[in-house]
Structures are given as C-alpha cells and as structure tokens.
Image (cartoon, grey):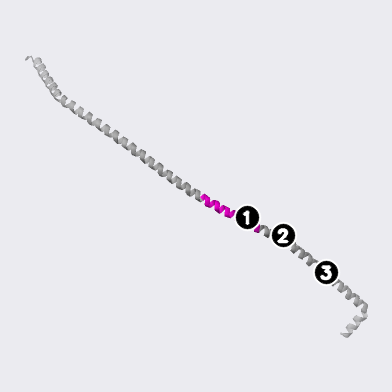
Amino acid sequence: MENFMNKLAEKFSSQDIIRANSQAEAAENARIKQEAEQYKAQLEEMKRTSEEYRAILEEMRSDAGDYKDQLQEMKEETRQYKEKLEENQTKIHDVGVQVYRNVQAVIEKSQDRNKEEIKDIQNRLETLQVSVETKNSALLPLSIITILLVIVDLVFNILRFLGII
C-alpha cells in the first residue's frame, strides 16, 4: 500500500491534492448551498401554504359560525311554524265542531218540521178516510135501494115481455 501511495504521491503533487481538495470542498459547499436554497424555498412554500390553509381554516370557522346561527334561526322558525300549525289545527277543529253542531241543529229543525207536516198529512188522511167512510155508509142504503129498483124493473120488463102484464 505504501507503494501505491508513493506512486500516487509522485503523480499528484501536494499542490494538486490541495487544489483537488479545495475543488471538492467548493463543489460540496455549492451542493450544500444549493440544498440549503432548496430547503429555504420549500420552507417559504410551506409558510405560504400554511398561511393559505390558515386563511381557509379561519373562513371555515366563520362559515361554521354562520351555519350555526342559520341553524338556530331555522330551528326557531320551525318551532314557530309548529305552533302556528297547532293553532290552525285547533281553529279548524273548533270550526268543524261548530259546523257539525249547526248542521245537526238544522237537521233537527228539519226533522221537526217534517214530523209536523207528516202529522198534518196524517190528520188530513184520517179526515178524508172518515168522510169517505161516512159517505160510503150513506151510499150503501142508496146502493141497496137502487139495486132493488133495478131488480124490480128487470122483473117487470121480463113479465111484460112474457106478456103477463
């Protein structure tokens, strides 16, 4: 290995080695500097993105608060609508009961009138029946007399036809 080093030392002078080391260090420094600049750019990008996310997050928080307020308003409106609906249902029920009672009263009055009319018609029919019966009772003797006269006339005509009279 010493031989190798000696040969290498012969080929490269110490000045060349220092220069090569300096160049290697400069290249390494440039690479590190470039990496540092990349990291710095990435950090700046992360800061900018972080600020954007922070603004978006703040906007979302604000929107969430607005949504919460709107939800509370909607709950209140829903409660009010339910109350109005219950009031309307109560009013509708009350009106329905009133209408039912009015209809029932009208029907009862109509039934009373109909009953009175039916009683009146029955009375008239009874009166008519009585008058017909009394007229028929007077007609019966008259009918009997008429039939007897017809029979006598028939007998008289038969006797005349036979020449007996």
Report whether 42 appears left or right of 151. right
User: Which label was assigned to residue 33?
Assistant: 3
Q: Above or below — where is 160 with respect to 104?
A: above
Q: Which residue is mark 2?
A: 52
**Main secondary structure found in the magenta portion:** helix
In the image, what residue type sits under mark 1? Asp
Q: Which residues are magenta?
A: 61-81
Q: Nearer the viewer, residue 114 or 152?
A: 114
Q: Residue at x 64, y 56 (%)?
A: 63
Q: Residue at x 58, y 53 (%)?
A: 73
Say whether disc 1 or disc 3 marks the residue closer to the N-terminus. Answer: 3
Q: Which residue is mark 1?
A: 66
Report whether 63 appears left or right of 129. right
Mark 2, secondary structure of its residue: helix
Q: Above or below — where is 89 with respect to 6?
A: above
Using the numbered discs, state the Cα–Cα distance from disc 2 to disc 1 in whole angstroms.
21 Å
Tag 1–tag 3 contact (CB < 8 Å): no
Report whether 54 appears left or right of 99. right
Tell me the crowding category of disc 1: few under 14, some 14 to 19, or many 20 or more residues within 10 angstroms, Cα based.
Answer: few
